[in-house]
Amino acid sequence: MKIIPLGVGGAFTKTSYHNNYIMQLDEKCMLIDAGTTLRYSLPEAGFHYRDIHFIFISHLHFDHVGGLEELVLQRFWHFEEGEHVPLKTTIIIHEKLFDSLSALLRNGLENQGRTVDDFCDFICLNDRESYKIGDYVFSPFDTSDAHAEGMLSFGFKLARKDLNIIFSSDVKRLEDAKLLGQIDNNTTAIFQDVSFTFNGAHSTLQEVLDYYPENLHRKIYAMHYNDHIENFLDVIERSHIQLVKKQKMIEF
C-alpha cells in the first residue's frame, strides 16, 4: 500500500494544499477526497485525472469535494485521436451521503440532456458493508456530527491481510466518532486530523493525545494541520506522533 498525500492542509491553507490523498492499491489508484486545490496538487504529484480508478468522498466541505465536478468533467471529456472516449468516474460513498452528493453534482452536470449517471457510477456502502479492491477491503464508518453538528461525515478502514489503516476524515469530538472502536491488533496507522491551535471543527493535538492510549501515539499520522507547521515541530517531537508531509509517500 502506497499513500501519496496530495496535500495536508486545512480548508484555508495557503501553503499545503487541501488534505487529499492518492492510495495506490496494487494496480489501482484511489483518490481520497477532492478539494478545490486538486487541480494543482494532483498534477504536481505526477498524476492525471485519468489515473484515478476510485474516489472516496468523506463529506461535503469544499476542501473535500470542491474539485470533484472538474475531475468528473475532465474524465468525461476525454479524447483519443480526436474521438470522444468518455471515462465515467466511480465514487465510493456511505449510502447516507448519496442524496446530498448527487444533488451537489446535479447543479453542474445535469444539462444538455445528460444526467449525473452519464458521468458517475456510485458504490454506496453502509456501516456493515465493505468493498474489495484487489486484495484490499475498504470499509466506511459513520462520524456524522463529530466534525460539525448536523453534518454527515465518514471515515474508513482499509485492510489487507494482517494490516489495516484507519482514516478519520475530519473530527472534533473524538468520543462521538468512536474511532477507538475501529482499531484492532492489525492497525498499523491512524490518519488523524490534528490542529496545533484551537479549532472549533478539528481535534487539537492535546485532544488527540488525551483520547488515544499512549501505546497508540506512535501510530498516529497527523494530517489536515495548520500552515507554518515549522512553529510546532518541537511539540510534535515530544508527542511521538508522525507528521504526514505533502507529496512525501508513505508505504506499508
Image: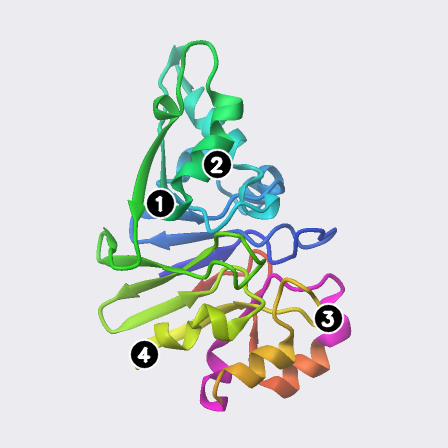
> How far separated are the C-alphas under marks 3 and 2?
36 Å
- 113 up-or-down from 187: above or below: above
What is the CA distance from the residue labelled 1 to the residue labelled 3? 32 Å
Residue 125: percent from left, percent from top: 29, 49
> Counting residues from the N terminus, which is met first, the one under dot 3 or under dot 4?
4
What range of the chain is rendered magenta?
214-232
Residue 209 location in percent, x, y? 57, 83
Q: Amino acid at mark 4?
A: Asp
Mark 1: secondary structure: strand
In the image shown, does 85 or 112 lie closer to the viewer?
112
Q: Which residue is mark 2?
A: 48
Q: Is residue 217 above or below residue 133?
A: below
230 drawn magenta: yes
Q: Earlier in the sequence, mark 3 or mark 2?
A: 2
Q: Which residue is mark 4?
A: 184
Which residue carries the number 3 mark? 198
Q: SS at mark 4?
A: loop
- The disc, 1 or 3, on the residue closer to the chain's N-terminal end is 1
Distance (Cα) linking label 2 and label 1? 19 Å
Gap between marks 4 and 1 measured at Cα:
24 Å
Question: Callout 4: few (<14), some (14-19), or many (20+) C-alpha neighbours within 10 Å?
Answer: few
Instruction: Evaluate whether residue 134 shows in this view.
Output: yes
Residue drawn 41% across and 10% down?
A: 113
Residues at circles 3 and 2 in contact by the CB criterion of under 8 Å:
no
Quarter of the image with the N terminus in it = bottom left
